[in-house]
Image (cartoon, rainbow, N blue to C red):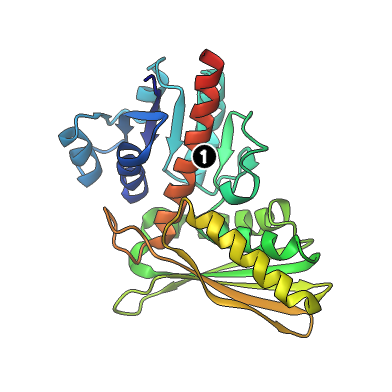
């Protein structure tokens, strides 16, 4: 059975975790290259042991291979802003795990099925993947006038890339809370918690709504949405079901990682790689259907 060939740019924790997810779970994608710009490191070493080609020529090695149809960008926002037009010119489809905000904001549980024709799929941020489904779950019951999300992650799961992109994280997530979650206004905050032992990723969602009296419907909608997210992120769960205080709805979700490569407390990394894989599988399915 033919699979779509894919490359991953960025051999850090996110890129390596994604590589292993594709190898283990993907039905429509074959990862054929893991590329970076610095030799050494656990990711490149692991790829070589698993028989996957590696390169330290970065994006150039990907653009030089015409067989690669999908590129997963696991670098940083500035890098993807530079690389995105080059992928487009070379006819490759980009799935962007950085907060560069190029292309359509995509959250698989919310808007994947209606947005499969593009060439640059923007995975928002880890906080966005965790909270935007909940904003949408509330919004489909009663209009959300304002939504604020607070993503709290272990400082140990925040690598150099996360720390360097905190401004982009807050800006991109806030915009996607509106564009995908449906809120009229949005705000995003990220907190790095140094506590030991490390905490799981925890996300608080505050929504100011028009009809807080529909609390039971909101709870039902949130539970359905959580089940949908859990279909591709098994460690996703609602820790505080929606409660009402005046016109404000508050709920909390937690994300536990699979623990196959990264620690279980790294749910922030797990959810974005899981979302990228879910998106990649659908995009590859579309490409395969065109060829049949």
Q: Is residue 100 above or below residue 118?
A: below
> Label 1's element?
helix
Label 1: few (<14), some or many (≥20) within 10 Å?
A: many
Q: Quadrant of the N terminus?
A: top left
Spot the residue most to the bottom. 245
User: Residue 116 sits in which quadrant?
Assistant: top right
The vertical placement of 173 against 287, above or below, is below
Residue indicated by mark 1? 279
Q: What residue do we see at 42% from left, 29% from top? A: 28
Horizontally, is 52 left or right of 75 in the view?
left
Q: Position of residue 252 (x, y in %)?
A: 56, 74
The single residue placed furthest to the right in the displayed view is 210
Q: Is residue 244 above or below residue 30?
A: below
Q: Is residue 270 left or right of residue 188?
A: left
Report the front residue among 112 and 92.
112
Residue at 40%, 56% (x, y): give it: 269
Q: Position of residue 65 (x, y in %)?
A: 38, 17
| Residue 170 visible from this viewpoint | no
Rendered location of residue 126, percent (x, y): 50, 56
Q: Position of residue 32 (x, y in %)?
A: 31, 26
Query: Which quadrant of the view contains residue 21?
Result: top left
Residue 9 is left or right of residue 79, and the answer is left
Give the residue at x 50% y 23%. 92
Q: Nearest the camera: 58 or 266?
A: 266
């Amino acid at each position: 059975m033919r699979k779509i060939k894919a490359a991953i740019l960025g051999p850090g924790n996110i890129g390596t975790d994604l590589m292993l997810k594709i190898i283990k779970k993907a039905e429509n994608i074959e990862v054929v290259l893991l590329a970076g710009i610095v030799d050494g490191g656990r990711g490149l070493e692991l790829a070589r042991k698993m028989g996957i080609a590696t390169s330290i020529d970065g994006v150039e090695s990907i653009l030089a291979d015409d067989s690669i149809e999908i590129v997963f960008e696991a670098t940083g926002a500035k890098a993807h802003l530079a690389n995105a037009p080059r992928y487009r010119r070379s006819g490759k489809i980009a799935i962007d795990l950085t907060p560069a905000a190029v292309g359509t904001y995509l959250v698989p549980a919310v808007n994947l099925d209606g947005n499969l024709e593009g060439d640059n799929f923007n995975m928002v941020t880890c906080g966005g993947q965790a909270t935007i489904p909940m904003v949408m779950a509330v919004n489909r019951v009663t209009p959300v006038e304002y939504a604020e999300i607070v993503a709290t992650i272990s400082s140990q799961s925040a690598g150099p890339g996360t720390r360097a992109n905190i401004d982009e994280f807050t800006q991109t997530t806030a915009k996607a809370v509106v564009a995908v979650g449906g809120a009229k206004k949005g705000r995003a905050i990220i907190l790095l918690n140094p506590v030991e032992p490390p905490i799981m990723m925890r996300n608080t969602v505050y929504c100011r709504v028009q009809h807080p009296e529909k609390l039971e419907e909101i709870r039902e909608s949130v539970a359905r949405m959580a089940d949908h997210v859990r279909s591709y992120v098994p460690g996703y769960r609602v820790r505080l079901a929606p409660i009402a205080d005046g016109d404000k709805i508050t709920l909390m979700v937690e994300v536990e990682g699979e623990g196959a490569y990264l620690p279980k407390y790294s749910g922030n990394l797990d959810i974005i790689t899981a979302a990228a894989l879910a998106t990649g599988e659908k995009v590859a399915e579309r490409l395969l259907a065109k060829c049949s």
